[in-house]
Image (cartoon, helix red, strand yellow):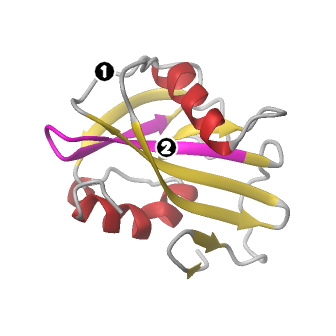
């Protein structure tokens, strides 16, 4: 896997890697972080999506007229069924060609049980020291920013 160049919020993939094509021109996702346990919730992707069987963020394509933040709020409801209070913190923007994917930390007060859609086959609440494998390549890209924010209790 090619590595990335990193500034605080921008992660750029090498253009010569052979990852799956992206759905749409832009997407947004989030990693829920529970204050009570200091763990993150990671989604196990179903066999019906790109990169099946990998562990990654909750998210998807940005609809026409939506901002990345509006899309990630919608996606957390659609994919996980979560409707409680959330503080969103921008973690990174992945760019490859004309495609962009904005990742957020979604800080919640307590762990919740996500509802699974056709896009997921499970989830786990874990610490960064206990991540399941294989990880989705997009989740690998957000890990440096995620580790920094989680180490500071969810604050930038």
Report which residue position mark 2 lands on. 30
**Count of numbered marks:** 2
Q: Is residue 99 left or right of residue 115?
A: right
Q: Quadrant of the N terminus?
A: bottom right
Residue drawn at (73%, 57%) of the image:
100
Residue 70: x and y, percent? 63, 34
Q: In the figure, 79 relative to 139: above or below?
A: above
Residue drawn at (33%, 62%) of the image:
149
Is 36 magenta? The answer is yes
Residue drawn at (28%, 24%) of the image:
112
Question: Which badge, 2 or 1, is on the more N-terminal residue?
Answer: 2
* Secondary structure at numbered mark 1: loop
Distance from Cα at disc 2 to Cα at disc 1: 16 Å
Q: In the figure, 32 relative to 156: above or below?
A: above
- Tell which of 36 and 13 is nearer to you: 36
Q: In the figure, 139 relative to 10: above or below?
A: above
Label pair 2/1, CB-CB below 8 angstroms: no
* Secondary structure at numbered mark 2: strand
Q: Quadrant of the C terminus?
A: bottom left
Q: Residue furthest left?
A: 36
Report which residue position mark 1 lands on. 113
Q: Which contiguous range is marked in magenta? A: 27-44
Residue 152: x and y, percent? 24, 63
Characterize the magenta stretch by its predominant secondary structure. strand
Residue 28 appears in which quarter of the rendering? top right
């Amino acid at each position: 896997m090619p590595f990335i160049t990193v500034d605080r919020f921008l992660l750029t993939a090498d253009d010569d890697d052979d990852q799956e094509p992206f759905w749409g021109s832009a997407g947004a996702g989030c990693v829920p972080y529970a204050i009570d346990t200091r763990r993150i919730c990671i989604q196990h992707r179903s066999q019906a999506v790109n990169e099946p069987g990998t562990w990654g963020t909750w998210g998807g394509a940005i609809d026409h007229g939506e901002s990345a933040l509006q899309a990630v709020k919608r996606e957390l409801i659609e994919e996980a069924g979560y409707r409680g209070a959330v503080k969103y913190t921008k973690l990174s923007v992945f760019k490859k060609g004309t495609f962009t994917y904005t990742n957020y930390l979604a800080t919640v007060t307590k762990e919740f049980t996500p509802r699974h859609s056709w896009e997921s086959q499970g989830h786990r609440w874990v610490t960064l020291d206990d991540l399941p494998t294989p990880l989705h390549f997009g989740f690998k890209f957000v890990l440096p920013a995620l580790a920094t924010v989680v180490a500071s209790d969810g604050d930038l």
